[in-house]
Amino acid sequence: MKHGIHPDYRPVVFRDRAAGVSFLTASTAASAATVEWEDGRTYPVVDVETSSASHPFYTGTARVLDVAGRVERFNRRYGSPTATR
């Protein structure tokens, strides 16, 4: 690896505002804001809108679309491609 071309990789706290959850991980993300973590040390904090704690796919609240019903409704409205030929 070349020296001096890579961003600084350090511990950063990511805070999910929607779920009220914070987690400490390593990242190259930069932030001027800091927060004191549970271990008593101060880390940069990055606020995110969505994380695995608040995303519908990971929390199990995602809606399942009825794709088969949509196709049948389309075929009823506009007919199937084989019916017009």
Image: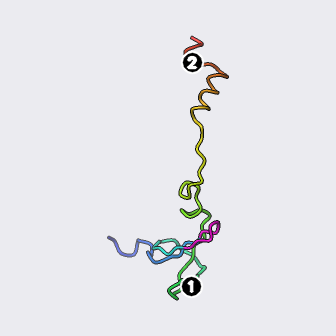
Q: CA distance from mark 2 to mark 1?
A: 63 Å
Position of 41 compared to 66: left or right?
left
Q: Is residue 85 above or below residue 4?
A: above
Task: List x then y, in percent, for residue 64.
Answer: 58, 44
- Amino acid tagged 2: Pro
Pointer 1 local density, CA inside 10 Å: few below 14, some 14–19, many at least 20: few
Q: Which mark is residue 36?
A: 1
Report the span colored magenta: 16-22
Magenta-drawn stretch contains 74: no
Q: Residue furthest bottom?
A: 40
Residue holding disc 2 = 81
Residue at 36% across / 75% down in the picture? Answer: 3
Q: Residue furthest front?
A: 60
Mark positioned earlier in the residue sequence (2 or 1): 1
Q: Residue furthest left?
A: 1
The C terminus sits in image quarter? top right
**Which of the 4 quarters of the picture holds residue 81?**
top right
Task: List x then y, in percent, for residue 16.
Answer: 60, 68
Q: Which mark is residue 55?
A: none
- Amino acid tagged 1: Glu
